Amino acid sequence: MTAVVVMMALTGCSAQASASAEAAGGIASTPGEKCSGGFESIWNSTPVDGNVSELPQETVTVVSETGRIFDAMRRGSDGTAEAVAPESVDYKVNVDPSWPKNHAVMIDTATDKVLEIIEIPADLPLCE
């Protein structure tokens, strides 16, 4: 039996970084502000072995209370995961009242399957 361990990690953005908001996928923050620009996990990354047969082609990560998409990923023709602007994804989020408050919910857009739920740390709010 093979066990798969899945972990979501916070990725961040800060105005202290030298990248522009356009280069960061439209994520911006005010000077000195620390905020999370998204989450990374097996579902929205490219495996070292290149086998993406069991992975989604597109994901969105949403705020559990509102359904606001704040992070999105789409796979290229070679299977490479690429961050895309949330507004470029044509997906209607159906907020589930059972989702815990103050959490990020990653969803496979093709199946509507919830892939991951992770708490949004109080000391690292989402970038607007």
Image (cartoon, rainbow, N blue to C red):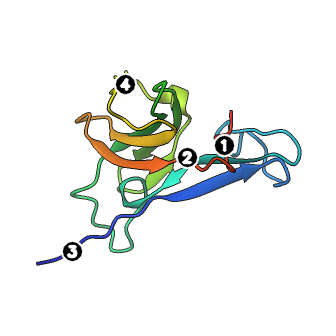
What residue is shown with label 1?
125
Quadrant of the image occupied by residue 113: top left
Q: Position of residue 27 (x, y in %)?
A: 68, 39
Instruction: Specify which label sits upstream in the sequence, 3 or 1.
Output: 3
Residue 109 position, x and y percent, is 32, 35
Marks 4 and 1, Cα distance to the nearest angstrom? Answer: 20 Å
Amino acid carrying label 1: it is Pro
**Tag 2–tag 1 contact (CB < 8 Å):** yes
Instruction: Residue 55: give x, y in percent of width and height.
Output: 28, 54
CA gap, disc 2 to disc 4? Answer: 17 Å
The residue depicted at 22 percent of the width and 57 percent of the height is: 54
- Give the labeled residue for mark 2: 120
**Is 57 situated left or right of 25 in this image?**
left
Please state which of residues 74 and 96 is positioned toward the viewer in this rendering.
96
Residue to which mark 3 is pinned: 3
Look at mark 4 in the image and give the residue it sits on: 95
Residue type for callout 3: Ala
* Mark number displayed over residue 94: none
Indicate the position of residue 15 as horizontal and vertical percent values. 83, 47
